[in-house]
């Protein structure tokens, strides 16, 4: 790896992790950087057809860092794996520039054929801890995958997805956010769905009450029903 490229890798970690205080600290104490260095060497051997040597180098890197990157994967520049333990990146995965993964992420395949089985992550994607991205689809440029999400289909560029299975819950509003989530601005899709159902039930009950009050079959003296109060949206 050229010196300028290696320095850019370290500087990108300093920019994305406020806990990093110096280049020396990153060089000595960041297993994500060490795993990428092992990958660069093993990938070089893989491209030359030295498959067993490539897998051996990759396995040594896995034992030392807890991060498993198949040497056949294609990874761009300034790739950052924060904390890192338990990350798995499959053989046909493609990762663009300035991508960030957190601990416990899997870029896995769900089929047994020899073609593209693992996901493609375009530039500036962030995948939060514990997320599982499974399949040969594309996660678009600048997308955010929330912690513990299970992604089984393509994600549009700039979208934020959460849940099992993952669904789009909004757009990425900042250039970088830790773990792929922006905190207080993150909507709860389940609460939003329940709130919508409650509003619909309220409206239906009010309409039924109006129809009953207008009906000529309503017995004389029957009190007029008051419609249920409107529930405020969350």
Image (cartoon, helix red, strand yellow):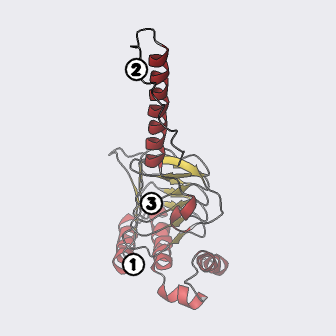
Marks 2 and 3 sit apart, C-alpha to C-alpha, by: 77 Å
Mark sitting on residue 199: none
Marks 1 and 2 sit apart, C-alpha to C-alpha, by: 76 Å
Q: Position of residue 6 (x, y in %)?
A: 61, 79
Q: Quadrant of residue 142?
A: bottom right
Mark sitting on residue 72: 3
Along the polypeptide, which appears first: circle 1 or circle 2? 1
Q: Quadrant of residue 205?
A: top left
Closer to us: 116 or 120? 120
Closer to us: 153 or 49? 153
Q: Residue at x 47, y 18 (%)?
A: 213
Along the polypeptide, which appears first: circle 1 or circle 3? 1
Q: Residue at x 65, y 76 (%)?
A: 8
Q: Position of residue 56 (x, y in %)?
A: 35, 72
Q: Position of residue 16 (x, y in %)?
A: 60, 74
Q: Are marks 1 and 3 in contact (CB under 8 Å)?
A: no
Q: Position of residue 74 (x, y in %)?
A: 51, 60
Q: Does 195 sit left or right of 140 as displayed?
A: left
Helix, strand, or loop for circle 2? loop
Count residues near mark 1 (Cα–Cα under 10 Å), then give few for <14, some for 14-19, many for 20+: many
The single residue placed furthest to the top in the displayed view is 216
Helix, strand, or loop for circle 3? loop
Residue 116 seen in render: no
Q: Residue at x 55, y 62 (%)?
A: 184
Residue 224 seen in render: yes
The single residue placed furthest to the front in the displayed view is 221
Mark sitting on residue 222: 2
Count residues near mark 3 (Cα–Cα under 10 Å), then give few for <14, some for 14-19, many for 20+: many
Mark 1, residue position? 65
Mark 1 vs mark 3: in front: 1
């Amino acid at each position: 790896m050229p010196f300028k490229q290696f320095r850019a890798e370290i500087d990108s970690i300093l920019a994305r992790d406020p806990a990093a205080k110096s280049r020396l600290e990153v060089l000595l104490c960041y297993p994500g950087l060490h795993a990428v260095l092992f990958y660069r060497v093993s990938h070089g051997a893989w491209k030359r057809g030295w498959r067993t040597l490539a897998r051996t180098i990759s396995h040594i890197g896995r034992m030392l860092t807890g991060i498993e990157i198949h040497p056949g994967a294609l990874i761009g520049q300034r790739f950052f794996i924060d904390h890192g333990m338990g990350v798995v990146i499959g053989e046909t995965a493609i990762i663009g520039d300035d991508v960030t993964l957190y601990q416990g992420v899997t870029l896995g395949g769900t089929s047994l054929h020899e073609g593209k089985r693992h996901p493609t992550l375009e530039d500036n994607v962030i995948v939060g801890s514990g997320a599982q991205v499974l399949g040969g689809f594309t996660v678009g440029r600048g997308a955010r995958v929330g912690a513990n999400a299970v992604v089984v289909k393509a994600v549009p560029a700039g979208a934020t997805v959460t849940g099992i299975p993952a669904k789009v819950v909004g757009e990425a509003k900042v250039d970088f956010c830790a773990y792929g989530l922006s905190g207080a601005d993150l909507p709860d899709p389940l609460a939003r769905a329940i709130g919508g159902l409650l509003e619909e039930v309220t409206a239906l009950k009010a309409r039924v009450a109006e129809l009953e009050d207008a009906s000529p079959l309503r017995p004389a003296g029957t009190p007029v029903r008051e419609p249920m109060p409107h529930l405020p949206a969350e």
